[in-house]
Amino acid sequence: MNAVDNWGDRARIGLFVVGREVVPEAEWWAMRPAGVSVHAARVTAASPWAPWTADRTAATLSPDLARGCRDFAAMAVDVAVLAHSSSSFIGGPGWDEAAVTALAAELPATTTATTNGLDMRLALAALGAKRPFLVMPAWMSDGIIASAAAYLAAAGLGVPAAWRYRPLDKWTGIAPDGLYPAGMATDQDTGSLFDQVARECPADADSILLAGTGLRCVAIIEALEKALGRPVVTANQASLWRALKAAGIEASVEGYGALLRT
């Protein structure tokens, strides 16, 4: 009997992830069902990773995305995920579809392309959620949070409140844009995140959306759903759910929320 080697004999999924993040791959490997492998291409481009053309009729791939598409084609991945919430938020209405079209033009016809923004919207719809409490990482600027709320509103989703996670006291005095350089990306606390979401969630929210693929949060999905009695969608969880569906993988994943049991 051979030992488990995490070979993707059921599906291979390619992730475009932020170059200096550790969370996306860790969370995907924690949640993914057996027989599904995850492979990352790292991106250092500015947001959105596939910028609009001047007339906003199409998106053009950054060099990192174009290189990643070539690599994913060689790997024969079944799904390629542009796993970056901020690109969708900053790109705005229509950007996800334009980015998918641009990715598909560089990938084999057998590979499904998707974006994190599209995945989160589809996940909320699958759960019947229309008024998510939006929770964003501590390092997100006011501008990106406003863009996220506007993006969701344009998709017909009400946002009763948007909350930026407040990190532990040791990060006090550091502005949001300084938290990443200071090392917070690799030093995140899920306990305080749980406490804040549970405390701040408004009564009229029908769900919780933890956006940002670099936000460490899938370990608290089940606890939040039990505490708040509402479904929880996170960036990485939503994209995994969408990728499994696109790859034709029917699997009920336990321990990471109602979405992955649908």
Image (cartoon, rainbow, N blue to C red):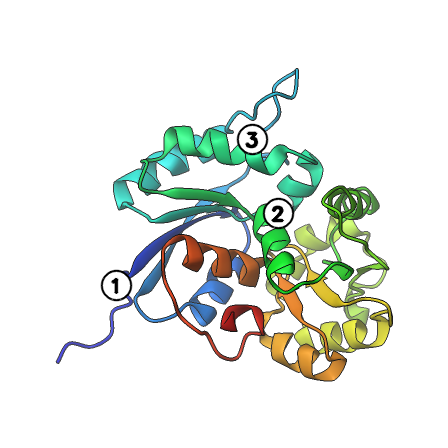
3D distance between C-alphas at marks 3 and 2: 12 Å
**Circles 2, 1 touching at the beta carbon (< 8 Å):** no
Q: In the image, what residue occupies the spot 74% across and 58% down? A: 130
Tell me the quarter of the picture where residue 150 sits.
Answer: top right
Q: Which residue is mark 1?
A: 7
Q: Which residue is mark 2?
A: 117
Q: Amino acid at mark 1?
A: Trp
Query: Element under label 2?
Result: helix
Q: Amino acid at mark 3?
A: Ala
The mark nearer the N terminus, 1 or 3, is 1
The mark nearer the N terminus, 2 or 1, is 1
Q: Which residue is mark 3?
A: 98
| Residue 175 x, y percent position in the rendering | 82, 52
- Choose mark 2 or mark 1, whichever is in front: 2
User: Measured along the vertical axis of the image, is residue 35 above or below residue 255?
Assistant: above
3D distance between C-alphas at marks 1 and 3: 32 Å
Tell me the quarter of the picture where residue 7 sits.
Answer: bottom left
For disc 2, the neighbor class at 10 Å (few under 14, some 14 to 19, many from 20) is many
3D distance between C-alphas at marks 2 and 1: 28 Å
Q: 156 or 218: which is nearer to us?
A: 156
Taking the view exactly as shown, the residue that stands out farthest to the front is 128
